[in-house]
Image (cartoon, rainbow, N blue to C red):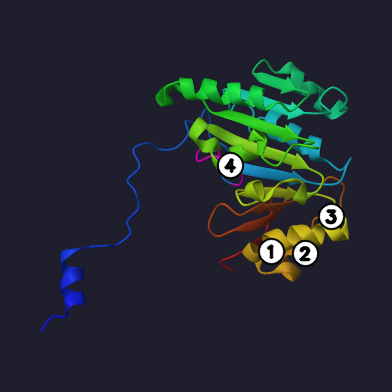
Amino acid sequence: MKTEDEGFEKNFDLTILPVKKTEGGIKILKEVSPILPDIKTGSCCAVVSSPHNGKSNLIMNLLCRNAFFRDSFQDVYIFSSTSKTDQTCKRLHEFPNFCVYDHFDDRVLQKILDAQSATPEEERGPIAIILDDMVGIKQNSLFHKISCSYRHYSVSLLLYSVQRLKQLPTIVRSNLGYAWIGKVSPTELSRVSEEFAEDFGGEENFERHYRTTQNEKYNFLYCDRDRQPPKLYKNFGPCLYSADN
């Protein structure tokens, strides 16, 4: 004799199924290395390092070299309070599809997003938004809120560059899929480890792998938290840790 629950389960299939997607993600302009952040699905990233230890150099490599993301975006929008004084970033002004702003204005960012929204999705090109040296930005700024919705605007790459991870509010940190950790103090390493280490075998394991990357200047521990399994790299290879090992 069937129970009431058994009859209910037979008549109503309440299995949680994935939604069938009608499009294949953000349109891409070229294929890139699978080690790099996935710009087809959209990537929220952070570069964390103390001053004068390679943050700008890494960003220049990512944006300007063919092996990385050069020619991957229809437009690149860079907000940097030091864009006029940082010698490393001067080349950014040479690229015709790069727009560089030396101040953070929510209204400017909103206009960029509005322009993306006004373009039909099938015609909308991928864009990158780089937010460098964010100091004194309000917690409720659009520059932080966008970390929740950037994919809806075909933002393929959203990248924050900071000296300390906690400069980014919780809303941003919870959406970070990728991070590069450069030279930081032991106190800052502890804070980063507390935030990320759960994906990488615990704090002791995370900090041990970090230390192996710091034998040369401008090296980074690259954390891929977005893909499965999560992985740690020294710069962009070799792989130091994979969560499935």
Q: Is residue 48 magenta?
A: no
First in residue order: circle 1 vs circle 4: 4
- Residue beneath label 3, please? 214
Task: Check the image and report above or below for 170 versus 122.
Answer: below
Tag nearer the camera, 3 or 1: 1
Q: Residue at left 75%, top 57%?
A: 192
Q: Disc 3, disc 2: CB below 8 Å?
A: no
Q: CA distance from mark 4 to mark 2?
A: 24 Å
Question: Which SS class for mark 1?
Answer: helix
Span of residues in magenta: 35-43
Work out which residue is located at the far bottom of the displayed protein and give it.
1
Residue 197 bears which disc, if any?
1
**Circle nearer the viewer, 1 or 2:** 1
* Residue in the image at 48% along x and 25% along y: 117
Label 1 Cα neighbours within 10 Å, binned few <14 / some 14-19 / many ≥20: some
Residue 68: tell me if it is visible.
no
Q: Amino acid at mark 4?
A: Ser
Q: Which residue is mark 4?
A: 43
To which residue does mark 2 refer?
A: 207
The answer for how far apart the CA atoms under marks 3 and 2 are is 11 Å
